[in-house]
C-alpha cells in the first residue's frame, strides 16, 4: 500500500512517451514527495485519442457528495476491486492510467 509517489520526468517527456496531448495545467516535475489529494498527471481516453491531464489523487465513491464525506481512499486490492461497493462500478466503466516514477510508504 503506497502512500507517496515520485514523478521525476518532465510533463512534455511523459506526454511524448504515451503519445498524448498534455493539458496546460499539469504540475511539472520533478516531484519527490507527491501525497494524496495533490494533482497528478493521468492518461484518459476521449473520442479515440489520449489525453494527459491533472486529477486529484484519491478516490471518491459515488455516494460521496463532497471530498470530505468520508475517508480518503487511495488503494484498492486487485483481488476484490470488482466486488467492493466503493470501487465496483468505477473499475468497470471509469479508468485512468497514473504515471509515476516510483512509489513508497
Image: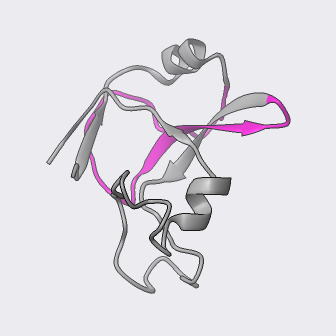
Residue reaching furthest right? 47
Callout count: 0
The percent position of residue 18, horizontal first and vertical second, equals 58, 19
Residue at image coords 43%, 82%: 68
Residue at image coords 54%, 50%: 55
Is residue 34 shown left or right of residue 99? left
Query: Quarter-wise, where is residue 84 in the image?
Result: bottom left
The percent position of residue 97, horizontal first and vertical second, equals 52, 37
User: Which residues are the magenta region?
Assistant: 21-48
Residue reaching furthest left? 105
Is residue 3 shown left or right of residue 28? left
Which is nearer the eye, 53 or 80? Answer: 80
The percent position of residue 86, horizontal first and vertical second, equals 48, 73
23 shown above or below 38: above
16 shown above or below 92: above
Does the stretch in magenta take in 28?
yes
Residue at image coords 38%, 20%: 9
61 shown above or below 47: below
The percent position of residue 52, horizontal first and vertical second, equals 62, 33
Does the stretch in magenta take in 93?
no
Amino acid at each position: 500500500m503506497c502512500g507517496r509517489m515520485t514523478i521525476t520526468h518532465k510533463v512534455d517527456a511523459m506526454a511524448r512517451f504515451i503519445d498524448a496531448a498534455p493539458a496546460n495545467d499539469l504540475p511539472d516535475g520533478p516531484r519527490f514527495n507527491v501525497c494524496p489529494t495533490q494533482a497528478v498527471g493521468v492518461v484518459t481516453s476521449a473520442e479515440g485519442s489520449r489525453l494527459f491531464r491533472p486529477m486529484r489523487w484519491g478516490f471518491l465513491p459515488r455516494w460521496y457528495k463532497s471530498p470530505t464525506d468520508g475517508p480518503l481512499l487511495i488503494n484498492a486490492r486487485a483481488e476484490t476491486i470488482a466486488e467492493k461497493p466503493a470501487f465496483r462500478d468505477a473499475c468497470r466503466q471509469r479508468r485512468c492510467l497514473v504515471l509515476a516514477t516510483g512509489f513508497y510508504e
